[in-house]
Amino acid sequence: MILIAEMQIADPTGRGTYWIMPPMLRLAALGVRGLRKAYSDVVAVDGLDLEVRAGECFGLLGPNGAGKTTTIEICEGLVAQDAGTVELLRMRWDSDAGELRQRLGVQLQETQLSEKLTVEETIRLFRSFYRRGPSISEVVEIVQLEDKRRSRVGGLSGGQKQRLAMACALVGDPDLLFLDEPTTGLDPQARRQLWELIEHFRTAGRTIILTTHYMEEAERLCDRVAIMDHGKIIAFGTPRELIASIGAEHMVEFAVDGNAGHIDLTTLEKLEGVRVARSEDGNYTLQVSELHRAVPALFQELARRGIPLTELRTHSATLEDVFVSLTGRRLRDE
Amino acid sequence: MSEGTLAATVRELRPAAEPRSLVEHSLVQLTLVRFREFLREPEAVFWVFVFPILLAAGLGIAFRNRPADVVKIGAVGVPLGAALRSEKSLAVDLLDHAAAEQALRTGRIVLLAIPKPDGGVSYRYDDTNPDARTARLLADRAVQRAAGRSDPVATRNELVREPGSRYIDFLVPGLLGMNLMGSGIWGLGFAIVDARRKKLLKRLVASPMPRSQYLLSFLLSRLVLLYVEVGAVVGFGVLVFGVPVRGPIWELAVIALLASLSFSALGLLIASRVKTIEAASGLMNFVMLPMWIFSGVFFSSERFPTVFQPFIKALPLTAVIDALRASMLQGVRLSHLGLELAVMTGWLIICFFTALKLFRWR
């Protein structure tokens, strides 16, 4: 909770003053306190606090096994927690389950919809569970499956199947949309199509909570993110804040000729504009605040020592770099 | 403002449910999905509708009662052959000794008559084969009459060939019961396990779908398919083989309904936890195999030793087949089928409530 309070004060968007807004918008869409869940062999969620505001797109990031899916499935009312409270739209699962189901949109990891039904039949089925919502045609149009409307689900591509899953999450016109790794396994084009869909929904003022291990996805879609590791939140804020928190805007990666020997990291960290240096298997990574000063300084140092450079890459710092700097591990390797 | 009233306020701010047509009702949609999934699976349609009819046709032809059934026997020596040919029900082959032995061994003839040097006749046959025993009686009568025996009592034959006592009459209710078992257990069990394996069950319970409607949709689709299925098998038996339906049709329908519900409950129980098709398949065969063997689909379950009978009578398929046979072939009324109906109801209740307790959506 302390973490959340700090983030609200530091919120650069000024939404911290939303007490003047109408009551509907003032509601926190999701509040989680002291959440714990242990399975027989592992503690999946270990004392988690989280608050998601109405109207934001919130990202839960972390490597596989970090507890993202368990957290989201507890919030969806599919898994019972061992301890802690979950409040959604000011309601709770133990007292308002029926109403909550009507107002949540859910897309799970790995659901295979029935292959023998057509797109339209599938959407019609899910639509029949909700009291209100858009028409079948509207949903089909939103997810851009008009020309596949009468095709069997079994014949759809991965991206089309994922958009159909999204359609099934949208049919009840949800106030809160849960997306568990919505773009995992999709090709770049299909991923971009899905991102547009999520952005469209967010523009309509709805709240989205998504999990992902694609950092570019979180940076593009999410207003705020929480980075999870081993069942705990290890960082929380807007993507920009988190990237700024490691104090470096750029990353420089380089490799040198294998025979040249090891370069002392403290030497590298003394170079102008370099904040942190790391090495792994002969590859070096520098967190850099001023790229235009750090790179010439690096060239100069290597030339002075007569070490030939075999590789050099630079990129702007990403959430991935935030994760690496916090845990020393990469996100996707696990 | 307390949280409860705030939640209530939020709820009031949302528009009320839209009016919708019956076809958009979730139960109707779920049931339609059941039909679509069934009808779009050609194998399922074959096993449920076509297979039992093919089986009945095949077995009905193989075991048909041939009107002028003659028994093939062999004889050694012309005089004996002539004596035997006076009996119309015997087809007599004149053979030499070696060929006759060969024919007997291969079952081409069921009995071999051999003249003895002392003027007597010896019969070689297998006394456990009813045809051979019949042949023995006919052959001996022919031989004795040819030697001059006359019957002291005058007898006359009145032939009765009544439907209801033939093998096909026995078989059709058996196949019907087996079919009801198969489609109840496979139909429900497979669909549920498959949906669980694909995490579709989990997705459905994450939606506001009323969970009872999901199970109810299976029941409703079974109800419709059940009567198509029963109609196809019984209709085929009646039209092609003249199998009798002596009890009232509605009572046959009640038995079929109760049977289908019991087997569906059994299917639900089998599918309540299983997560893979392989495990489900093994479990279903394990449950169905004893019934295929013991419940009297193809031959009477009375043939098993008496000690097994209480166990056999307690099997749901035995109860179903006994009730179907009694109703169709003898016109026994439901009021006299208390035991069978009780066994079916017992299985229905025990399986259904155990399944509800064990059932997992994930």
Image (cartoon, coloured by chain):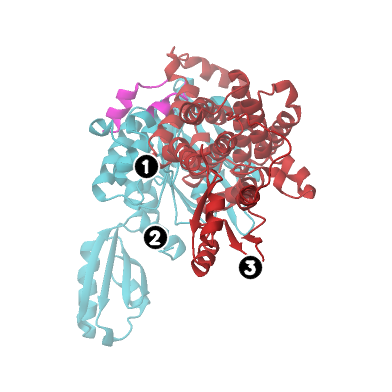
Chain colours: A cyan, B red
Disc 3: host chain: B
* Relative depth, front residue between A74 and B200: B200
Dot 2: element: loop
Magenta stretch bounds = A123-144
Quadrant occupied by the C terminus of chain B:
top right
Of pointers 2 and 1, the one earlier in the residue sequence? 1
Give the left or right position of residue B262, taking residue B188 as reference. Answer: right
Dot 1: element: loop
Disc 2: host chain: A
In the rendered image, residue B198, in percent from the top left (x then y), is placed at 46, 45
The residue pinned by badge 2 equals: A332
In the rendered image, residue A41, in percent from the top left (x then y), is placed at 62, 59
Q: Are marks 2 and 1 on the same chain?
A: yes
Task: Please tell me the numbered disc located at residue A222.
Answer: 1
Give the left or right position of residue B22, taking residue A273 as reference. Answer: right
Quadrant occupied by the N terminus of chain B:
top right
Alpha carbon distance from label 2 to label 1: 19 Å
The residue pinned by badge 3 equals: B117
Question: Is residue A207 in view from this perspective?
Answer: no
Find out whether the residues at labels 1 and 3 contact each other: C-beta distance under 8 Å: no
Instruction: Verify whether residue A140 appears in magenta.
Output: yes
